[in-house]
Amino acid sequence: MPEFPFIASTKAHFRSHCATALLMGGLAWGTLAHAADDNRVIVLDSGEAQLSLIDEASRTVVGTEPTGKEPHHLMITPDGKSLIVADSVSNDLMFLDPHTGKVQRRVEGIEDPYQLGFSPDHKWFVTAGLRLDRVDIYSYNGQDVTLVKRIPLAKTPSHITFASDNKTVFVTLQDTGEVAAIDLPTQTVLWKLHIGDTPAGLWMTPGDKYLLVGMTGEDDVAVVDWHNRTLVKKIQTGRGAHNFRNLDDGKHVAVTNRVESTISILDYTTLTKVADITGLRPGPDDMELSADKRYLWVTFRFAKHVGIIDLTTRKLIDTIAVGRSPHGIYFANSAPVYAPNPD
């Protein structure tokens, strides 16, 4: 979703010993202190064109770095050597060293990369252009991204996920209330399915059985049998159901409710809600799981904070002040292996 507060329209994821001054692509980069380990969390402050670097252990911001305009989402490359930050308004990608924070390179001419993702086989790199109403498909050889096809997809394509067979990418179309399926080998739209008001986040259940869709204009998660192109059911969660994070316990996935300011826990084996996490700051959005799977970190888009939830008690135990409109979040100590189901 765009960085503007959702209340205005319910339809609308470092190892160095020195501070480094960076200059790349004509932009002056500030200094940033890095510890000799990977105990870092990166948060994209999309409203301030910067990233915040947080020390995970002390839960304090230890530095910031400029980015391009409106960095919303990020993703580790399949080889784990680069962290890609997508600057949607600057129309470029920043490649960072995920362990040192140094800018490795910039790739310009990537228009409106609001959301991004690699296919499970790493052959395809896909971006969703929310403001340009299209999806761009690139080939990827481990270094270069080369445009293969631009596909018009009105209106406001936002979140994406892939089938494990590497043939299909799914995209939500927020303003038309649809999910679209695109065939990657032929770069053609296979089908669209209308599922309700303002679909956003996507998550594929294990075995590729169902697509779960956060219905940001509603108070539920849509369950889609994509093989048969049917809406199976809707799971009531909270107002503004938006984005997902697998809790890696073989049973549960979390979904943020941006308007309700809660997080719901779903049992994806029974397709039911089992709990709600309340007492949060406004606008919970993207989430990431600590390496020990005990803590769930969440960005609060409307509160300029990151929250830390103890999954044992399912309570918010700490908050960290960051920049305006925090969105994407990444843990440097996460395993550098590409997951085909990005959140």
Image (cartoon, helix red, strand yellow):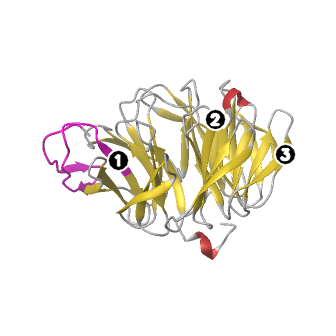
Image quarter hosting the C terminus: top right
* Residue depicted at x 43% and y 44%: 13
User: Where does residue 121 sit, x and y in percent of width and height?
Assistant: 57, 23
- Which residue carries the number 3 mark? 231
Dot 2: element: loop
* The residue positioned farthest toward the left in the image shown: 18
Dot 3: element: strand
Between the C-alphas of marks 3 and 2, the distance is: 22 Å
Q: Which residues are magenta?
A: 15-42
Answer yes or no: do the residues labelled 1 and 2 have beta carbons within 8 Å?
no
- Give the residue type that dot 1 points to: Val
* Residue depicted at x 39% and y 53%: 43
Marks 3 and 2: which is nearer the front? 2
Q: Nearer the viewer, residue 85 or 38?
A: 38
Locate residue 139 relative to residue 18 in the image: left or right: right
Q: Nearer the viewer, residue 131 or 224?
A: 224
Q: Is residue 119 magenta?
A: no
- Which residue carries the number 1 mark? 41
Asked if residue 147 is positioned above or below residue 50 in the image, the reply reads above
Dot 1: element: strand
Q: Earlier in the sequence, mark 3 or mark 1?
A: 1
- Give the residue type that dot 3 points to: Leu
What label sits on residue 251 in the rendered view?
A: 2
